[in-house]
Image: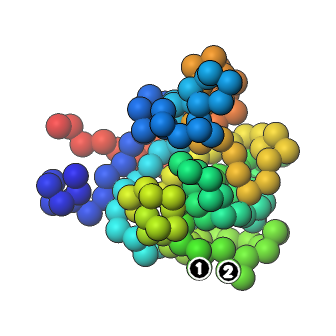
Amino acid sequence: MLRKNKAKIAFGGYLEKRKIYQDKPNFTANGKVRDIHLGIDFWTKAGTNVIAPLAGTIHSFRNNTAIGDYGPTIILKHSYGSRYFHTLYGHLSLASLEHLYVGMTFKKGDTLATLGTPDINVGYAPHLHFQIIENMEGQVGDYPGVCSEDSLDHYTRNCPDPNLLLQIQRSPP
């Protein structure tokens, strides 16, 4: 799609219903299909730098290798007044996880990571999954990036639209 449109980057996907998850066992457990996307994806070339959109500290990180998962993932914790929230960065390079430690700080504009290749990111084309999470609910290094229809109310409250932070202006078609 990027080549066809002579584009360097494509984005989209918050609350988008996607069929891509329906053939993956960890998205279809108990007869419920998790297929509603909770983040924004940015498709571009592998190796592209991922920049911290605001200051934060490492909450956790992990290589999530299940089929359809994030691959290398970093989660930052941010403060806003007396409140805290988190941002998740998935589909990174393995090198992005090297030398990290919980509590490590990043300033707004720092290079946080680089995008991974399909062989590292369980077959997905190079892209960044970016998600805001208010309450990590005890999760470490991972958090659901898609939900089922019956859990949508919970996840839209806990994972607001990332564009609230990013403020991406869409061009008219």
Give the residue displayed 73% in from the left and 46% down from the top: 85
Q: In the depicted view, which residue is nearer to us: 132 or 98?
A: 98
Q: Position of residue 159 (x, y in %)?
A: 64, 36
Distance in Å between CA atoms under marks 2 and 1: 5 Å
100 versus 44 height, above or below: below
Residue denoted by label 2:
98
Q: Quadrant of the C terminus?
A: top left
> Considering only vertical position in the picture, is 99 above or below 28?
below
Q: For the residue marked with disc 2, what is the amino acid?
A: Glu
Q: Report the residue at 71% width, 63% height from top.
A: 62
Q: Which residue is disc 1 drawn over?
A: 95
Judged from this view, the residue extending furthest toward the top is 150
Q: Residue furthest bottom?
A: 99
Label 1: few (<14), some (14–19) or many (≥20) C-alpha neighbours in 10 Å: few
Q: Residue at x 69, y 33 (%)?
A: 158
**Dot 2: element:** loop
Counting the numbered discs, the total is 2
- Left/right placement of residue 146 relative to residue 56 reads left
Q: Which mark is residue 18?
A: none
* Whether residue 16 can be seen here: no
* Kind of residue at badge 1: Ala
Query: In the rendered structure, are the residues bearing label 2 and label 1 in contact, judged by CB atoms less than 8 Å apart?
Result: yes
Q: Is residue 154 visible?
A: yes
